Amino acid sequence: MKPAAIVIAIAAASLALPAAAQRKPEHVIHYRQAAMTMIGWNFGTLAAMVKGKTAWDAQEFALHADRIAGLAPQVLEGFAKGSDKGATTDAKPGIWKTFDDFTAKDKNLVEQTRALAEVAKGGDAAAMKEQFKKTAEACKDCHEKYKAD
């Protein structure tokens, strides 16, 4: 390989570094908080329907479930190494100490939100409510261990 080609390859590889590694910790924290806020916003709409506080609307449920399924895979990026400090956060330090467990819980959240969006496409209210409960459990499982009150 020619020296110029090596330089280009190295430059291209450096551009491929994860975006979070190139960001300030406070920006990473704000990113994850924004993702969580949007998930919470959409989840609240579903919870209100499931609890009977608002009218059941399968199409609206599916819309919000799909949004959550799109946001959930983005959450882990907001917990980049070094983002345990830099801004006010409810994230407990245990996240970075037991990152494999945290990652497993995040993976479960992603799976449950995808299942929720898929079930919602079918329009079966009972199935949607049942999967909503499983998705809520995935949220709770992580929040109980890794989110400060």
Image: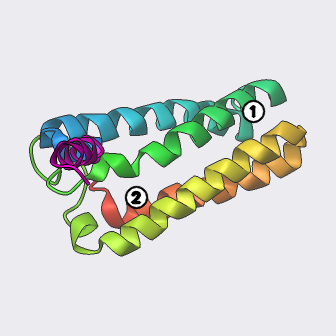
Instruction: Count neighbours of disc 1 (C-alpha within 10 A) and say few if under 14, some if 14 to 19, many if 20 or more.
Output: many
Q: Looking at the picture, does residue 74 appear above or below residue 104?
A: above
Q: Which of the numbered marks, if any, corresponds to residue 143?
A: 2
Q: Amino acid at mark 2?
A: His
Query: Does the stretch in magenta take in 23?
Result: no
Q: Earlier in the sequence, mark 1 or mark 2?
A: 1
Q: Which of the numbered marks, if any, corresponds to residue 148?
A: none
Q: Position of residue 7 (x, y in %)?
A: 17, 45
Determine which residue is flagged by label 1: 62
Camera-side mark, 1 or 2: 1
Q: Looking at the picture, does residue 112 appear above or below residue 56?
A: below
Q: Is residue 55 visible?
A: no
Residue 54 lies left or right of residue 143; in this view the side is right
Q: Position of residue 116 (x, y in %)?
A: 71, 48
Query: Does the stretch in magenta take in 3?
Result: yes
Whether label 1 touches label 2, CB < 8 Å: no
Quadrant of res 37: top left
Q: Residue at x 44, y 43 (%)?
A: 74
Q: Looking at the picture, does residue 74 appear above or below residue 38?
A: below
* Near-viewer residue (104 or 147): 104
Q: Quadrant of the N terminus?
A: bottom left
